[in-house]
Amino acid sequence: MADVGPLTYSTRAAARILAVSPDRIRYWVKQRLIQPAANQGRRFRFAFHDLIMMRMARELIPKRRRLQPLRQCVKKLGGSDNKSRSITSLKLECRDGVILVREGEVVFEADSGQLCLQFGQPRKPAKVEERFGPARVRERFEEAKRIAEDDPFRALRLYNELLGQEPRNFELHLRMATLLENEGDLAGALRHLLGAAVLMPTNAEVHQRLGLLYRKRGDKDNALSSFLRAIDCDPASVAAHRNLAELYEELGQKREAMRHLSTLHRLSRDGSP
């Protein structure tokens, strides 16, 4: 089962968020388009990535027909539990009843894989550049930050849209990681933190956050490696030494735990952040 984290949603809560009927959600589950994070009979609990899939179904399939193309699309593209490709990164659209996948300038049919050649529709770079100029990017970024708590779905879409234009934007990856972790999508959060670490490999905060996330996922080995990397980047990191002391204690390595605890006391006494 994919990571669901502590936050899940009931059928009724998901229906309110998505503005669909509970019966529509139960139908999607019955048709195996959605696999609930947990269930007891007909009482389902859904993770954040389940809600994202349902939002896609609502937008691409407004009526109960034509579920099979979307189901095949998700299966071919890796599904919501694929570790290398998050469901949140899929760019899907419906055209004349056919689900299309867009990857940059390439558009293909989800079901058949056939490329869609858009003859007679030349690009208009000036229009694209105007929409995603620096001022527009900052405006959308600030909007996503502002609404992240109250409307995580819209914030997620805005961040994804901006990352499509600026895939090497360090702060965007951090914001995406925070949003996804808050909504219980630990695998998605991990992907964005790893992306941030690639962009800024000597940033102690990123490795500290990776350590905490790995620890939350129960991966103590990678958590340990990440906390040690944070110390390499910033030997005076109180948080990293504290987490290392706690983790070594859990692992039964008393001597290492005491070493980091002593360093933690010294740094705290010296007033290090």
Image (cartoon, helix red, strand yellow):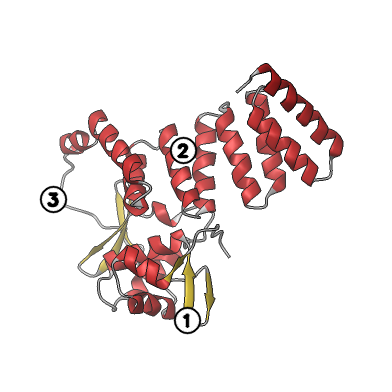
Mark 1 or mark 3: which comes first in sequence? 1
| Camera-side residue of 39 and 158 | 39
Q: Amino acid at mark 3?
A: Gly
Is residue 108 positioned above or below 250 on the image? below
Query: Residue 53: horizontal and vertical position, in percent?
Result: 39, 63
Residue 153: x percent and y percent? 35, 54
Disc 1 on helix, strand or loop? loop
Kindly identify which residue carries mark 1. 42
Give the labeled residue for mark 3.
Answer: 120
Left-right relation of 107 to 197: left
Q: Residue most toward the left? A: 120
**Image height of 47 relative to 39, above or below:** above
Q: Residues within 10 Å of mark 2 (few under 14, many from 20)?
A: many
Q: Secondary structure at mark 3?
A: loop
Locate residue 73: give its quadrant: bottom left
The answer to whether marks 1 and 3 mark residues whose Cβ atoms lie closer than 8 Å is no
Quadrant holding the C terminus: top right
**What's the amino acid at mark 1?**
Arg
Between label 2 and label 3, give the one nearer the viewer: 2
Q: Secondary structure at mark 2?
A: helix
Q: Pick whichever of labels 2 and 1 is earlier in the sequence.
A: 1
Left or right, residue 57 beside residue 205: left
| Residue that lies at the very extreme toward the right in this rendered image | 255
Amino acid beneath label 2 = Leu
Q: What residue sits 23% from the left and 70% below the top?
A: 97
| Residue bearing the label numbered 2 | 174
- Residue 168 seen in the current view: no
